[in-house]
Amino acid sequence: MNARLAERARHGVLFAVLMAALVAGCARSAPPPPANDVAALPWDSIVSRARGTTVVWRMWRGDPAINAFVDKWVAPRVRSQYGITLQAVSGQGNELVDQLTVEREAGAVSGTASLLWINGETFGALRARKLLGGPWSQVLPAAVAVDSSSPIISRDFEQDPAGFESPWGTVQLALIYDSARTPVPPRTAAELSAWIRAHPGRFTYDQSFAGITFLKGLLYSLNGGVDSFRGGFDSTRYVAGRTRLFAWLDSVKPLLWREGQQYPPDVAALHRLFANGEIDFSMSNNQNEAVTKAMQGVLPKTSRALVLRDGTIANAHFLGIPANSPNAAGAMVVANFLLTPEAQLEKQRPTVWADGTVLSLARIPAEWRARFDSVVNDPRLVPADSLRAYARPEVSPRYHERLQDDWRRMIR
Amino acid sequence: MTARTSSLRLLSFIALLLFATAPLLMLMVTSLSRGWFYPALLPAAADGSAWRELFTDAGRRDALVNSIALGIGTALVATTLALPLGRAAALSTRAVRRSVALLAFTAVALPPVALGIGLQLTVLRLGLGGTLFGVFLAHLVPTLGYLTLVFLGVFTRWDGRLEESAATLGANGVTRWRLVLLPLLRRPIADALALGFLVSWAQVALTLLVGGGAVRTLPLDVLAMLQAGQDQRAAAGALALAIPALLVLGASRVAARSTSAVVA
Amino acid sequence: MNSATSTKRARLVPLLMAGTLLGVPIALGVGYQLAGAMGLVGNAAPVELTRVLMDGAVLRSAALSLWIATASTLLATVGALAVALTFGGSRALDRMARRMAVLPLPVPTVAAAVAVLLLLSQSGWLSRVATSAALVAGPSEFPALVYDPVAIGVITAVVWKELPFLLLLALSLLSLRGDALTDAARTLGATRWQAMRRVTLPMLLRGMWPSIIAVFVFVLGSLELPLVLASSSPLALPMLIQERRQAPDMASHGEAFVIALLATVLALLAAVAHEWLRDDAS
């Protein structure tokens, strides 16, 4: 009996020791260094810290072409050049703000994501809640080539990135039409309005980003141009502008697809309607989607893009590092890689993504300039000078939020 | 049967045949077509790229593997837990049976979006946010509900006489389980495993909310493809979802038929 | 161990097990919804319950979801009964029909939704057939079956998927009790039609009620069906929850939690109804 008790006691002690070790092992380790601390180090030491680590990048995964660029071109190269394992997962916009806030509420020591694809209102919301780490983007070696004089890149929806986000691409809203069906498309908002009246039921816009951006562009052109809305959010100016915009929308509403009672949920549904001939126009935040999607077989080969002469919205997208990022060093190295001429050029190819570059061609080495020229001047894409001439920058993100909210409540 | 009723029956049969198979055929044709627009009745050429990509593309493969792992894990764990629970409840009082059935059905009936919102916060606090294990735990909830109801039904209609005879013949608990209960339970267990797998396999809202975009499964992939306008890939993914489900159900039926046990 | 303790154990054990395995997750899920509605967690601001529940958009969404659930469950039940009674025999045609009708049973909902979208949209396959047959001149002339306010596309997808489920149940009920009852009725002088109407159908319905409620509540809470097929205005209830959840402001998040609670309460009511009817049925 005594031997049995002794045996039991031994097992008990062993068990207790194991439990203690387990608990100690699971004890909270120190939080990872925030982005601004890492940014203070010399670049070489940032690169060596990043080696052998994993970077989880939360980005929009809604386009297989972009996913292919990231998974099959960027990831192998950052692996071979910097030893970083890049994992891209889905996450964008308000979802990111929500998740990071909830992670902080739950007391997580470090989050899951190291890098975020953000812009505009998302950036604003994250900054306001101090969910972004930084400043850090100024230390990236490739950042010297960025076209910082461009209003689209130096300001993100009128907000100053202030080193808390690094630019990596630009896009401009364009309408997409089928040159076979619509040989002479409308080129201004007034012509569009006349076209809609002449072709009832053949135009609509989606409820998601592209649709709201289209509406914002109309908001500018119906109210004296983007300058009326610069300089922060002004409720009076917004309401006056919205009244005119909604009056325009109300006047065309019964002539829209499904008499303006239903709207496609996202741009893919809009493309589907367009490709199958239910409507004659689609649109996209990326001006070259007509080309890339035609290559993927999603849009008919005769699809073309046009930018309205009243101006369409151009904006840049950026990369941010969350405040609770587990790997700020790795994130910075990846962000830097994406700014290199090599990555920017690849991204701009029509066969890949046709996303605009943030680099100033004057500041990159000469041998790259020629390659960029040939890609940018591809005859299938919207000509660069048209784009520039009609580009209008974004204004305060509050306009976007209010417009989306009011549209849902009053028009939909 | 008159000629009229018999031709009516034949017409109904054909209508039923078309109704049952048309959606699956549509998925099959779309998954093999590229740039198939209105008003073309048939695609111009067959294109197997979407199917190839399902197995060659790393992201699609991961989604497939995650779905399979979640399905098998959920089926096994839920069956193991629901069987004793169902049995204990069935052998108990009527009030207990009803309470357990109510709880189980609630787990099933709660809208996944509503439940998912709540479970997402739970999982985040446990530090399992965006992990496969977190999603697995979420999938367990409705699955346990379904399987508890299944076993509750099985054991309520149970004929305990074989067990009693075994007991009077001197068999102890373990032996009774091994030689009498488990063989009799082969069919219900097979059904439960199949159902458990299917419940997890088809989950959308729970995975979306609890996984937070980080956990990719096949149904989420299908939705992503659809929302990206990639109908061909979405159709291939949808069929890849449907075919194993059909196979799993078929397999469990075959297993059930081959059992030689007698169930009262 | 005497019989008193063993009965108590027989009562406690399943209750404890169910409590931990089922009760805890449900309590956590619902509990966090409540906490979110009060603005305690989930990046939400507390909102006034009555204001949200009286909001036109919420009421319209609830009405749409209830309509979809009711109509599709009704049609699926009628269809299942029709197939069970038409093809309930033992001939080759009957057996083939039954096997085929059950085919859609295990297909995941999202796959069914995608298939129905491809078939029924105004530029879908059925529309193309109609165009080839010169019945319609263009996509806009084909009736709007998806993204429509009546949710015909959603209802079709649900019926496709749930008819087999209810059919299997009807068939098993018929095989268990059908013949004995109809034989008795027939010997008492009832015609085939009378026997069906007064004996078989009521028996079937009584046995099917719990499953009918199960289908109803499943459709009510499904996200993937309206995500793929349903209209933008009004939004189905699960879609409205998602939209509010993903909005930029915290007030919308609070609203999302409240609407989620509403959906939960509806589901709980259905669970109670299910349990009450289940006991009657067995």
Image (spheres, coloured by chain):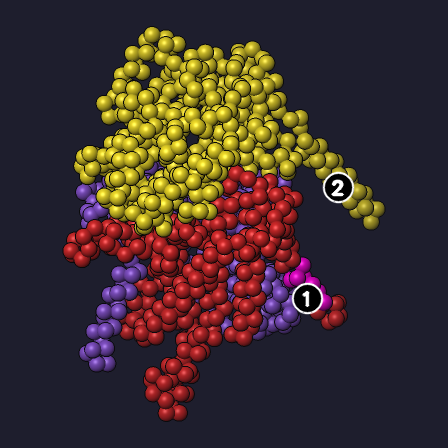
User: As displayed, is residue B17 above or below residue B208?
Assistant: below
Q: Position of residue B136 (x, y in %)?
A: 53, 46
Q: Image quadrant of residue C81?
A: bottom left
Q: CA distance from mark 2 to mark 1?
A: 35 Å
Q: Residue at x 21, y 81 (%)?
A: B2
Residue shown at 51%/35% (left/top)? A235
Residues in magenta? C8-16
Q: Residue drawn at (65%, 57%), measured in percent from left and top?
A: C19
Chain B pictured colour: purple
The red-coloured chain is labelled C
Left or right of A23: which side holds A180?
left
Circle 2: element type: helix
Chain containing the residue with disc 2: A
Find disc 2 in the rendering and name its residue: A11
Q: Nearer the viewer, residue A256 or C108?
A: A256
Q: Give the numbered dot on residue C11.
A: 1
Q: Position of residue A75 (x, y in %)?
A: 42, 25
Query: Which colour represents chain A?
Result: yellow
Q: Specify the amino acid type for callout 2.
A: His
Q: In front here: C138 or B66? A: C138
Q: Residues within 10 Å of mark 2 (few under 14, many from 20)?
A: few
Going by the numbered disc 1, the residue's amino acid type is Arg
At 70% across and 35% down in the image, what residue appears? A23
